Image: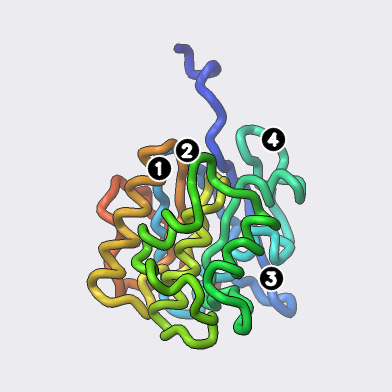
Amino acid sequence: MSPDARPAPLMYVQGLRFLRNDVPVFGPLDFEVGRGEALLVQGANGAGKTTLLRVLAGLLRADAGTVAFDGRPAEALLRAETTAYLGHLPGAKADLSVVENLEYLCGLQGRRPNQSIEAALEVVGLAGYEDALARQLSAGQKKRLSLARLWLSPAPLWLMDEPYANLDLQGIELVNRMVKAHLADGGATLVTTHGAYAAPPVRTQLLELRRPH
């Protein structure tokens, strides 16, 4: 296969830049992530890691640069179909049960083929909590509920912001297994860390963010 015939990366980023109150937060950044690949985004607190993921997820608007998925410009619908965002907040409705939250989210975002909510709860260690209200869960259990939502998502690109936070050693191993399985299935992931948590044990690229001067 000639270089020109190689498939486009799942995500391609060029010249991406973000300002807050006219002060640079990050950029310009150039990077790409292919299917089956992981990108580890490192940097100190305040370096812009969370902001970068929110820009890629379409929650914030970049001030400059382009993002493409599979060679196509990242229009809103394509971005929603391609990315699944795991942020610091659980993203669950407190007065809905675990199952009701996942049913609601699957209704909005779709569901991975041949995957049931019950199977996802088994994967993340929440089997038996189907009827528990989200507000009754511990911080670690809420993170596992968020991981179940990620596992059910049909989106090929996972944007994971500090995914090891609020998890014990078993939870950290769970994240690692999920990332490995997702990559083996042709997905890709971006994982942010400031160095306090382990990185997934997969082959990774490294993007280090530093505050612009």
Q: Residues within 10 Å of mark 3 (few under 14, many from 20)?
A: some
Q: How is the image coloured?
A: rainbow
In this view, 86 is above or below 31: below
Question: For mark 4, what is the residue?
Answer: 72
Marks 2 and 4, how far apart at CA = 14 Å
> Label 1 sits on what residue type?
Glu
Q: Earlier along the polypeptide chain: callout 3 or callout 4?
A: 3
Q: Earlier along the polypeptide chain: callout 3 or callout 1?
A: 3
Question: For mark 2, what is the residue?
Answer: 34
> Label 4 sits on what residue type?
Arg
In percent of width and height, residue 86 lies at 52, 65
Q: Residue at (35%, 46%) from the top-left corner? A: 181
Marks 1 and 2, how far apart at CA = 5 Å
In this view, 171 is above or below 85: below
Marks 2 and 3, how far apart at CA = 27 Å
Question: For mark 3, what is the residue?
Answer: 19
Question: For mark 1, what is the residue?
Answer: 37
Marks 3 and 1, how far apart at CA = 28 Å
In percent of width and height, residue 125 lies at 34, 67
> Label 2 sits on what residue type?
Gly
> Label 3 sits on what residue type?
Leu
Q: Nearer the viewer, mark 3 or mark 4?
A: 4
The answer to which quarter of the image holds residue 71 is top right
Q: Earlier along the polypeptide chain: callout 2 or callout 4?
A: 2
Q: Mark 2 and 4 residues: CB-CB less than 8 Å, in contact? A: no
